[in-house]
Image (tube, rainbow, N blue to C red):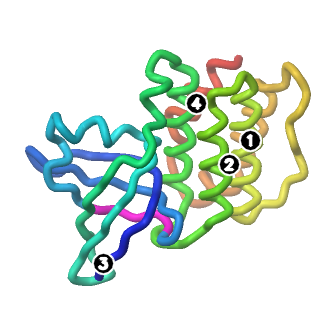
Amino acid sequence: MYWSDEGYLLSKNNFDENSIIVEAFTLNHGKYNGIIYGGASRKQKRIFQIGNKILLHWKSKNENKLGYFNVELLKPISPFFFDDKKRSVCILAATSILKILLPERQINKKIYSSFEIMLTNLKFDNWIKLYINWELSLIKELGYETRAKINHEGNDKKALKYNRNLLMENFILPNRLKFPLFRNILENYFI
């Protein structure tokens, strides 16, 4: 089995001294895991920042087993916000939510597109409202209909709390998941 696809890095974990296991959300293959040999090296570390857009080449002997990635950086996202704690936490909150809520290997181009738009627009002043509306669109795409859309000034605190309640009631508690730490940190910035 072999495929190539674009995607966003959701998480990375050390596998051995020089390798990492990454989880990526891809356009045409959904959420996928794979081992990257040499991914922990100094030369490659810059590629593996959470939220970066990458080109993945996946290879495995069996479609149902953990495969191997070769990765190229397409677009750095995270480094632009290293000096901005709130936006950095926003990226980590969004990727953490996708990591726990998206099913493995299920394609969802609407979620991918909305995530990409949200990341692209983080540079604008109204980034938190864009993030809040992204969460609402994610909740809707995952099967819970809501009509809320946040447009009013000063409602960031209430909107984040509203979204958290929707996530908790419909996904986190029923599936016995742990609410992402970075999502809590993000909400605390706006209290």
In this rendering, which labeled residue sits more in front, label 1 or label 3?
A: 3
Label 4 and label 1: CA atoms lie apart by 11 Å
Q: Quadrant of residue 23?
A: bottom left
Label 1 and label 2: CA atoms lie apart by 6 Å
In-image side of 100 versus 40 (left or right): right
**Residue 183 or residue 108, whichever sits in front:** 108
Amino acid marked by disc 2? Leu
In this rendering, which labeled residue sits more in front, label 3 or label 2?
A: 3
Return the residue at label 1. 163
Label 1 and label 3: CA atoms lie apart by 38 Å
Task: Tell me if label 1 and label 2 are in contact, CB under 8 Å.
Answer: yes
Q: Residue at x 57, y 34 (%)?
A: 183
Q: Residue at x 75, y 52 (%)?
A: 137
Label 4 and label 3: CA atoms lie apart by 38 Å
In this rendering, which labeled residue sits more in front, label 4 or label 3?
A: 3
Question: Mark 1: few, some, or many residues within 10 Å (few <14, many ≥20)?
Answer: some
Q: Quadrant of the N terminus?
A: bottom left
